Image (cartoon, coloured by chain):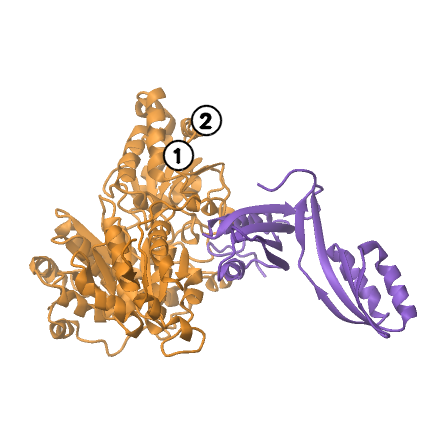
Amino acid sequence: MPKLLSGAEIVFKALEDQKVEYIFGYPGGAVLPIYDELKNHKSIKHILARHEQGAGHSAEGYARSSGKPGVLLVTSGPGATNAVTALTDAYMDSVPLVCISGQVPTHLIGTDAFQECDTTGITRPCTKHNWLVKDVNDLSKVLHLAFEVATTGRPGPVLVDIPKDIQFKKGKYKFFKNRLKKKLNGKASRKISNSELDKFIDLMKKSSKPIFYTGGGVINSGPDASKHLRELVSLTGFPITSTLQGLGAYPGDDPQFLGMLGMHGTYEANNAMHDCDLMINIGARFDDRITGKVDEFSPGSKKIHVDIDPSSIGKNIKVDLAIVSDVTELLMSLNKRFKEKNKNFVSSNKQKTSKWWEQIGKWREKKSLNFINSNKVIKPQHAVQRLYELTKNQDTFITTEVGQHQMWAAQHYKFNKPNRWMTSGGLGTMGYGLPAAIGVQIANPGKLVVDIAGEASVLMTMQEMSTAVQYRLPIKIFILNNEYMGMVRQWQELLHEKNYSESYTAALPDFVKLAESYGCVGIRAKTPEELDEKIKEMINVDKPVIFDCVVDKAENCFPMIPSGKPHNQMILGPEEEEEISDEGKILV
Amino acid sequence: MAKSKSAYSVPGKIGKIERHIIVVWVDNEAGVLARIAGLFSGRGYNIESLAVAEVDKKKHISRITIVTEGTPQVIEQINLQLKKLVPVHKVADFKRGEKDILFRELALFKILGSSKKIDKVRKICKKFNPVILDKTNNSVVIQVTALRAEIDKLALDLKSLGLISTSRTGAVAMTKGPKIFN
């Protein structure tokens, strides 16, 4: 007869068996039995956030930089609703999270009890799956299943709602392993057929204007996927572009890399996507920020799509060859097959793609990421470039908030390794970067973690600085401060006749004093002259830092594919701005 | 209005709308119907009719039959999205009008009137397996099974004969011959 354990003990037993080291959370009435049990489990460390959304983004940062699932513990009612933004964010960006929420005791469910809400109802559309556990003997099974659902196939968040009485009740514990018979989201560890591979290779050999378009799926598949991708790109000699989430899978400073594509992508990447005759999509999902107008998206190309989630294939764009697979598995067999039959492909194929590379060279000459620098005010792009130059020689992790600064970071910071770039792409959650940096720093002690932030975004979760100070996490909050919600301001300038409705933040705090009041270090840079010194100072402080980088207030983020224009007509800079049609203005 | 040249979120060409019957086998657990219905409402798909009941008492498997409309692309998404749900075991998809599939809906009609009128009602319903479930001096409850369009028409025809209440199920479906869905 196995020993009976309380629900709270079962929770920790399951977390231990899942090798969980950190949980991010916030206590409250309905999870008190679980918090009470925390002291008996030394291998698990709890990180106390200041808001459940912060705990959630920290868990995301932890997961994305470590490849392990992030664990989140919140109370019922407001605890759970506060976590919803983070769960939705994780759902959109395919981040494995396990959220454990307390619930009012089973006999009170449905009575509008204090701090009761329909947590499984609310989180149903923003999780891969969720469970309300009404019998303590189901608890261990559900918890292990939760980890499995979160981490298999296309990863994502799950939630386990545990009523308070179930946390007290005694029941049996069992470690369930690999219970899922169903192949979730095409987790199918299936063998890829040679005929599929040959078709793939054949398309590559026939192409004279090929391009790789890779995304977050490469990162999610693990560091090996990156390795194999680099091999494939060098075996073929083809150009490669990446989505926002895929940055780092391929070295950002490599000559075959065309930079990021999409709404704020480079001129060469977007034009190459438009004009190519073969598009090889590996782990990206033809999101609307990439495709623009679907009917006019890359009209002349054959398309290959590799995705682990069958529902991603054919959702937005029809493709010619669809392969449902994990990226690592596919690339491993593809590279092997390719090498067997195609010795010296790069040199023998050079002739065929030379015109293509020539064309790409012409696009590159536009230098679409250029900006007019100044020696009086700090240009935000310049600030990111200096940050990159001064941090590129150490293993640096970058998180961001959402807005102009995020796009400048994506454009000007060059990533060479996967899992070094954490940004909210799908949901676009302002306030993501600071708490995410906390999770990243916990997963990567001793490494440099910088949140490239905007002053508006960072104020949404600023309270988490207190968490960083409590756990001595020396994260650097690098604020490009233009006193505006910059991307909103930019759209208002370009699309709404410069009616800057509510996008200016009056009464901003003094970020240096704010830093000091949190017990961390505040640094301010006002001129380009002092920027380098101040950045070095920031890097060298072994404490959390809020860096107030005072930048040009009116700078816009270019290149930009404006609404109302076809995909291959980008605005490159202020001198090229064009009128945008009325119909274009209604679009987001 | 000038043709929009927008690069963003312009609706693409809309394909032909088809009506499909989608059959889903699910674990009969709390909230499973909300998951299915939520998937449809959340992604903007339409449910025209729905029939649910447990079909395997031992394994607690329910069979859900959903009638829906959409472009071929949307129908494909519905299938793929349904298959991703954890409690879903399998999904079968039929185009309305496919030859190898049987569809049935059931309806109950309550009609007020003299026995003469009620005889007339029985006559009209004759083709649709009518069963009198309840009868009084001046009322009758009659059950029919038929296709949707047939029931629509019946209800219309019965209106003048004293129909005062209609209750209908969603469609259920099954393949012809010895084959089953796999």
Q: Is A506 drawn above or below residue A206 in the view shown?
A: below
The subunit carrying tag 1 is A
Q: Of the residues shown, which amino acid type is indicated by label 1?
A: Pro
Q: Which mark is residue B165?
A: none
- Mark 2, residues whose alpha carbon is within 10 Å: few (<14), some, or many (≥20)? few
Instruction: Tell me what residue is drawn at x 17 percent, y 70 percent.
Output: A466
Between A251 and A147, the one nearer to me in the picture: A147
Q: Position of residue A63 (x, y in %)?
A: 27, 53
What residue sits 15% from the left and 48% below the top? A395
Quadrant of res B108: bottom right
Left or right relative to A372: residue A279: right
Whether residue A303 is visible: yes
Q: Residue at x 30, y 45 (%)?
A: A219
Eye-nearest disc, 2 or 1 = 2
What colour has chain A? orange
Residue B169 lies left or right of residue A430; in this view the side is right
Q: Is residue A288 above or below residue A201?
A: below
Residue appearing at x 38%, y 58% in the figure: A138
B98 is higher (above) or lower (below) than A485: above
Provide the letter of the chain coloured purple. B
The disc placed on residue A195 is 2
